[in-house]
Image (spheres, grey):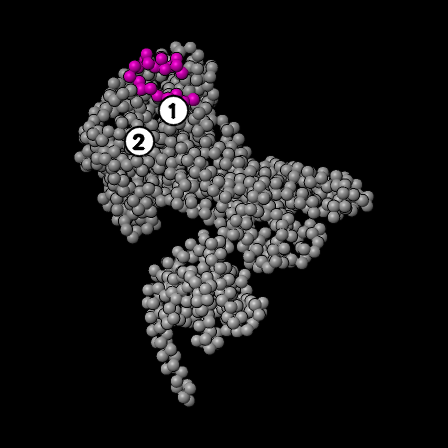
Amino acid sequence: MAEPRSDILQGTLDLMVLKTLENMGPLHGYGLAVRIEQLSENALKVNQGTIYLCLVRLVQKGWITATWGTSDNNRKAKFYALSKAGRKQLKAETENWERIAGVIGHVLRPLTGR
Amino acid sequence: MLTMLRALAARIRAVFRRDATDRDFSAELESHLTMLADDKMRGGMSAEQAQRHARLKVGGVTQLHEAHRDVRGLPLVETLLRDLRYAARTLRRDAALTTFAILIIGVGVGASATVFGVVNALWLRPLPFVNPARLVWVANGPSENLSRQAVQVGHVVDLREQSQSLADLAGFSPFYGAGDIRLTGTGEPERVTGVPVTQDFFPLLGIRPWLGRNFTAEECLWGAPRTAILSYGFWQRRLGARAELIGGVITLDGALTTVVGVLPPSFDFSGTFSPGRPADLFLPFPLSPENNRRGNTLALIGRLKPGIDLTTAAIETATTVDRFSGTAPEVEPGRRRNPFLPNLSPLQERISGRFHGALAVVAASVGFLMLLVCANISNLLLARASARHKELALRMALGAGRGRLVRQMLVESLALSCSGAALGLALAFGGTSLIAHFDGASIPLLQDVRVDGLVTLFIVSVTVLTGVGCGVLPALRAAGALPQDALKNASRGVTGGGGWLRRALVVSEIVLVCVLLTGAGLLTRSLIRVLDVDPGFTPENLISLRVDPSRQEHPTLETRNAYFDTVLQHVRSVPGVEAVGLTDALPLGDNFGWRGWTVSAKDRASTNPLVRMIDEHYFSAMRIAMKAGRGFTSDDHPSSERVVVINEALARALWPDEDSLGRILRASGRDYRVVGVVNDVRYFALERDTGQEMYMLLSQTGDYQTVDLVVRSAVPPARLIPGIRAALKRADPALPAVEFRTMEQLVDRSVLTRRLIVLLLAGFASFGLILAALGLYAVISYSVSQRTREIGVRMALGAAPRTMQGQILTQTMTLAAIGLAIGLPAAWIAAKAIQGLLFGVVSWDPVTFGGVAAVVAIVAGLAGYVPARRASRVDPVLALRSE
């Protein structure tokens, strides 16, 4: 059964996957999961399997592509890579995120100041 | 947007490539687990430990698979498909029940869609004219009879000029007869029917000629060269659909007539304005003084001006007519215009309004039938839901949600109703095309009955309603089932929780059947009463055919009389012929005497009897009984005293307390002596009084349009036809071949509509009765099978088989009695609603109600007898051991 998650969290995970793929190049699901755990400093305590629900959605949207390949340790694994459309989407999403973060920060500042 | 489409496409693909995608995902998860375990082992764990940790970290594989499918596919559609597959499997397992359900839904949907098709054509669909809601029928006075509603030309001209509320006014002359005109010159001579119309008739309706043009003003002048516009059907059938005919000539009644146009195929004058009477071509009707002198000649249609409503128009028209009527010039010296009492009604209402009552009855019955079908299916599904109690409980125990079960049951009943509707759609196509090609009924617009968008929408709604309606009770029952109860003990509970529900359904079926049976019974008895009516003549062994001479060849009264003498002489000499007579108005025929003359007598108020022109042998040929005096004889001729024979109604009206024989009455400026009184004859319909009538001699007046020959024979008349045909050919080689009609055919045709309604209702009622009987049988026999153990115990304790049998029968009859107790009063209310269609029976007719009660009781008895017998044969030992 799918864990009920809020849209924000889902969108955040999408963004993290896209950004990680941009930074690191093609990665398999396990690699992505480990990397994201490291980046988020274990803030995201989810089953690693959930990453695949995010991945299949991104593939269907055409933002990332998937191909079977071989890992560093010579294991068979499915590698995900950012597509052109995904790169564009990442750029748009990043800008959007920064704008929202700016606004939220602006709103929160006077409150914390008081 | 593009992204969404791409994602949707990917989702659909995923649904179809489910297995491959599942395998791929399995492999991916496997590789993930391996890599994770590798890392753990590198960190110092044992292989076993590492694998366990890896599984924990990744999460439940089954759940992930499930979630993966939901994310990548179309979860709603997939469940629906799964439900459908499951439903199909369940329905196949119960093949007999499924077939039965599909059949009765099919018949129900087919019947109701066909009836709806008729309602649609006659009631809902606007007339096929431009802006038909603005068209009004302008009648003269309150009469129902088309010919009595006609208006004199002078009034039409004045009203057209002065009306403030009608944008335009046009009309046709209804006094044309089927086959009035002789078409010669192209092939065999043929009688054709021409409708005289005013110049604006087609433009008013918004009908543009298919070919050629409308009449010009010059062509609509008195004495203008003859012109005609053809109907599409006639142009196709008789004139080979030749386009070059436009501007060419055809010969009508011996005169060359220019064809100026052909009407579009969609325009059906006959079906709309004069059902049962053909309309081959249209002739200009001049609004001239000559036609003004002919009296009331035009049936009028007007178009309301924008922004004017019917009430306003009616008041304004009445005022305007009142104003000009007072100052209107005399038609002829000493003769004023006929009265004109404008009576406006919507054209659609005028055309099909009088059928709305009968239609509502048929529609209501088919609605009841559909309810019966639903109750029956619901009952069957409930029975099956009880039988599937365990299965449903098991599914629930295994984690299926209540919502899921309800959905499953609804999908099943919807699948049933959809399959039934597919059959129903086919039946509706058949039914509507049967009705559209139904000939001879005097019902308008029938040819437009078809399965169109609205009928399809109707079928879809009925299907969904049926599916949900039938499924909702079983579904709720299924959802209400408690798994622990059902799994605990299947044989517990005497009749099962749904028992009362099913009994209520059966009672409601009996109520519906009561209403249907009563309606059918009352109308059948009415039909029998109508057929028992004495028409005033003897229709057996009597045939008729048109013989009127062409006015070109026989221009004077003398030559026409001579022509009739020759014809009569020849036909009388045919062996087997008993008597031969002539009339211009056959009872129950097409031209049933439209002329109402104003008749007066000394010291009496004037009255308006219908006038028939006959010869001296007509009464004896028709066997119309003389009540007093004598009929016409050969001593009455053009130069002797003018004489009339009147019917009893006219005699009563003019001389209520005195003898009418020998008295003088004045009609159309001439004096006539009453020499005889005859029996009233039903001219319009068997169930309708004709009213006052007056018979005049053809040879003395010469004022007739069409003449029919009636032949009385000693043997079945069909055998005489070749002989009569040959005799007519000898008498007049130019006489067009016409069809012979037996008077019995005319009588049959006059009751056709009534018979049709009776047939439909009787069919619905019988079908309903079968359904209710099956429903009752199903409930009783289910309750017997549920009580087998109890019955076994009782019998083991000494109850007699007869007692058990009696108990079951009592149970059945109680249900029937409750049904009757509600059903008969309901039927009585329904009967009052159809009072207008009844003839000769009262709405509380004891015979019908008694009959309905008896039929329901007998059928209920039969339905209960079989299970009761089974109950009496229960073997206590077997019944107790079977647990």
Residue B643 visible: no
Q: Residue at x 43, y 40 (%)?
A: B118
Q: Nearer the viewer, residue B697 or B751?
A: B751
Q: Nearer the viewer, residue B405 or B30?
A: B30
Q: CA distance from mark 2 to mark 1?
A: 37 Å
Residue B209 visible: yes
Which kind of residue does numbered mark 1 sit on? Tyr
Q: Residue at x 31, y 31 (%)?
A: B233
Query: Horizontal and vertical percent for residue B823?
Result: 60, 45
Image mark for residue B233: 2
Q: Is residue A48 above or below residue B455?
A: below
SS for callout 2: helix
Q: Residue at x 59, y 48 (%)?
A: B381
Q: Is residue B145 left or right of residue B19?
A: left
Query: Horizontal and vertical percent for residue B308?
Result: 30, 51
Pointer 1 residue? B695
Which kind of residue does numbered mark 2 sit on? Gly
Disc with the residue nearer the chain's start (2 vs 1): 2
The span picked out in magenta is: B721-742
Q: Is residue B702 left or right of residue B361?
A: left
SS for callout 1: strand
Specify the quadrant of the image occupied by residue B73.
Answer: bottom left
Query: Horizontal and vertical percent for residue B195?
Result: 29, 32
Specify the quadrant of the image occupied by residue B149.
Answer: top left
- Could you tell me which quadrant the N terminus of chain B lies in? bottom left
Asked if the residue under mark 1 is in contact with the one under mark 2, i.e. CB atoms within 8 Å, the reply is no
- Crowding around mark 1 (Cα neighbors within 10 Å: few <14, some 14 to 19, many 20+) is many
Q: Residue at x 33, y 27 (%)?
A: B178
Query: Horizontal and vertical percent for residue B304?
Result: 29, 47
Badge 2 and badge 1 both on one subunit: yes
Q: Is residue B576 left or right of residue B185?
A: right
